[in-house]
């Protein structure tokens, strides 16, 4: 029974069955969070795309609603594709989305709620003048999709950006509109990056240099940086960069040109794509949604009858300590699922040790952990690695002087199946330490038809900071965050033995010389019991 398959998650959003991909038009309205999503009502593979719809009071407990939009017009008959919501100044709401036409041309369409007094926004009306935008001259008919939320220009017009490509250069087109029906293309592009290919699901938003609040999409000024994100069709990676947006020249420039969109920072170093943020006016924060695909075989997806999750929504803020990256953190509401916790305080994990943590079933957990590394070991170690990368390393089995050390999640008692999440420290020839944060899927399952990459990244660790991680475990997904969210890594894993009551948790330290001291708090997590809205 697909509904009972153990790989189904307990507190992640996923439809009752079939295929899901991108999050669409997230918003908060009259007490409800709304999530729309790319959905195939007919199969567990991509196709026949409609907008699924769900609502929640708290971003965690979701209720399925009837489909919001289906392909029923010539301008979206091949699919109601990705789009974004904009609140107008009078509190009303518009949705712009991409339609794939009867000729498979990508066009932009306008839709709006039929009844603004309905907090559930059940009925959507497609504007009679659709499409409102068609591919401009010089742009491929299939390279024009995923309009953003609009922001206000200094002249009081609304502006959107849409991703595309010119040969192999990824580009962000700009349009101004007053009524969302008629548009004027701005000359040139907001930004272009050669070699990155088609930009899907572009996102563009301000983050504050000084406050801990999220910002409405129209906010601009000296206290603000702007994030530009593109989902790279060629690599299926969401890259972002932090930069400066000039609303006079209509250009955005990265603050660190070597970290431009597509070459520098990723939202997530694991499985995470086609993401979208929105400003949550309810709690004054910006929230990031991301599509987490399966990494088993398509055959397995069809047999289990479903495919894909949405990640636990994350708040996003500029990291004011580094100024050079975002911080992503699971929304605080997920903590409402925490049941009893267990503390493991100042546990010494000697070089080479594996220590079981007796927490009961370990399939639904929230873990926070802190690791203290022996300062003498850091000082005395020899230069240990110039070119370490999680992805090309030997994973948690590769022993270095100062790492790896961390946590084995979704492990069986014999450790035949295990997903290690860990730090690995290397010392360069400049004697400086560099810390990496990795998640190793190579031994996650004895099954052979599943992804076994080792994911991860360098993570900045500032003077005096401890090494900290947070891990959300939910059956077949592991979301790992290092250093308060400077780096995030999402893994999909499909153990066959480490399931239900056989699932265990361990501390490990596979360094050759470096004892570490770990302090952890581990919560069991309730299920969110996602179900249809009783209409
Ligand atoms: N998914 C949608 C497109 C978008 C892509 C189609 C990204 O609009 O570019 O399902 O995953």
Image: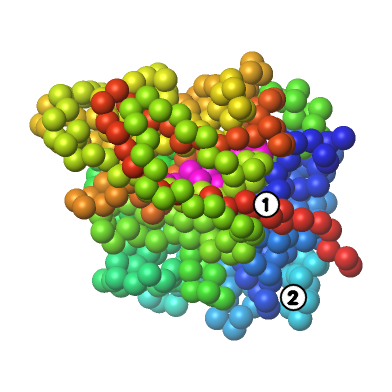
Q: CA distance from mark 2 to mark 1?
A: 24 Å
Q: Residue at x 63, y 18 (%)?
A: 446
Q: Main secondary structure of the magenta part?
A: strand
> Mark 1, residues whose alpha carbon is within 10 Å: few (<14), some, or many (≥20)?
many
Which quadrant would residue 518 be assigned to in this image? top left
> Mark 2, residues whose alpha carbon is within 10 Å: few (<14), some, or many (≥20)?
some
User: Helix or strand or loop: what does disc 1 sit on?
Assistant: loop
In the image, which disc is placed on residue 119?
A: 2
Residue 166 in sight in this render: no
Q: The magenta stretch spans which residues?
A: 469-481
Name the colouring of the figure. rainbow
**Closer to the camera in the image, 523 or 163:** 523
Spot occupied by residue 534 in the image (x, y as percentages of width and height): 88, 65
Q: Residue at x 71, y 53 (%)?
A: 527
| Residue 470 among those drawn in magenta | yes
> What quarter of the picture does the N terminus occupy?
top right
> What quarter of the picture does the C terminus occupy?
bottom right
User: Left or right: 186 with respect to 430?
Assistant: right
In the image, which disc is placed on residue 11?
A: 1
User: Helix or strand or loop: what does disc 2 sit on?
Assistant: loop
Query: Furthest residue to the top?
Result: 448
């Amino acid at each position: 029974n697909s509904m009972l398959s153990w790989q189904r998650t307990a507190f992640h959003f996923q439809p009752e069955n079939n295929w899901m991909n991108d999050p669409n038009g997230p918003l908060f309205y009259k007490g409800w969070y709304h999530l729309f999503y790319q959905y195939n009502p007919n199969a567990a593979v991509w196709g026949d795309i409609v907008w699924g719809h769900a609502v929640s009071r708290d971003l965690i407990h979701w209720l399925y609603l009837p489909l919001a939009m289906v392909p029923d017009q010539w301008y979206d008959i091949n699919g109601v594709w990705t789009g974004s919501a904009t609140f107008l100044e009078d509190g009303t709401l518009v949705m712009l989305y991409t339609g794939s036409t009867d000729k498979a041309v990508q066009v932009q369409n306008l839709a709006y709620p039929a009844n603004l007094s309905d907090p559930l926004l059940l009925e959507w009306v497609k504007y009679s003048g659709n499409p409102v935008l068609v591919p401009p001259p010089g742009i491929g008919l299939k390279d024009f999709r995923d309009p953003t939320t609009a922001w206000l220009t200094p002249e009081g017009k609304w502006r959107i950006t849409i991703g595309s490509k010119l040969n192999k250069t990824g580009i962000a087109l700009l349009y101004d509109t007053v009524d969302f029906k008629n548009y004027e293309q701005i000359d040139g592009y907001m930004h272009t990056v050669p070699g990155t290919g088609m930009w899907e699901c572009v996102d563009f938003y301000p983050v504050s240099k000084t406050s801990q609040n999220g910002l409405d999409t129209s906010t601009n000024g000296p206290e603000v940086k702007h994030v530009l994100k593109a989902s790279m069709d060629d690599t299926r990676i969401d890259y972002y960069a932090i930069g400066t947006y000039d609303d006079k020249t209509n250009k955005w420039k990265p603050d660190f040109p070597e970290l431009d969109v597509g070459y520098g920072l990723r939202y997530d170093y694991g499985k995470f794509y086609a993401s979208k943020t929105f400003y949550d006016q309810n709690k004054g924060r910006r929230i990031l949604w991301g599509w987490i695909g399966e990494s088993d075989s398509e055959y397995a997806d069809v047999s289990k009858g479903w495919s894909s999750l949405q990640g636990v929504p994350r708040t996003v803020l500029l990291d004011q300590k580094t100024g050079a990256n975002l911080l992503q953190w699971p929304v605080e509401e997920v903590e409402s699922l925490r049941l009893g916790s267990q503390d493991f305080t100042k546990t010494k994990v000697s070089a080479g040790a594996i220590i079981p943590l007796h927490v009961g079933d370990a399939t639904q957990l929230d873990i926070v952990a802190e690791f203290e590394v022996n300062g003498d070991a850091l000082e005395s170690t020899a230069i240990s690695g110039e070119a370490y990368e999680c992805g090309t390393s030997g994973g948690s089995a590769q022993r270095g002087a100062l790492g790896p050390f961390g946590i084995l999640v979704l492990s069986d008692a014999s450790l035949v199946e295990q997903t290690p999440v860990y730090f690995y420290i290397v010392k360069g020839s400049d004697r400086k330490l560099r810390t990496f944060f990795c998640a190793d899927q190579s031994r996650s399952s004895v099954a052979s038809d599943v992804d076994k990459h080792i994911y991860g990244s360098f993570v900045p660790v500032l003077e005096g900071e401890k090494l900290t991680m947070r891990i959300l475990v939910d059956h077949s997904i592991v979301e790992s965050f290092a250093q308060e969210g400077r780096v995030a890594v999402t893994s999909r894993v499909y153990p066959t033995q480490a399931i239900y009551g056989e699932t265990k948790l361990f501390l490990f330290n596979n360094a050759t010389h470096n004892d570490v001291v770990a302090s952890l708090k581990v919560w069991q997590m309730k299920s969110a019991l996602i179900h249809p809205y009783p209409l």
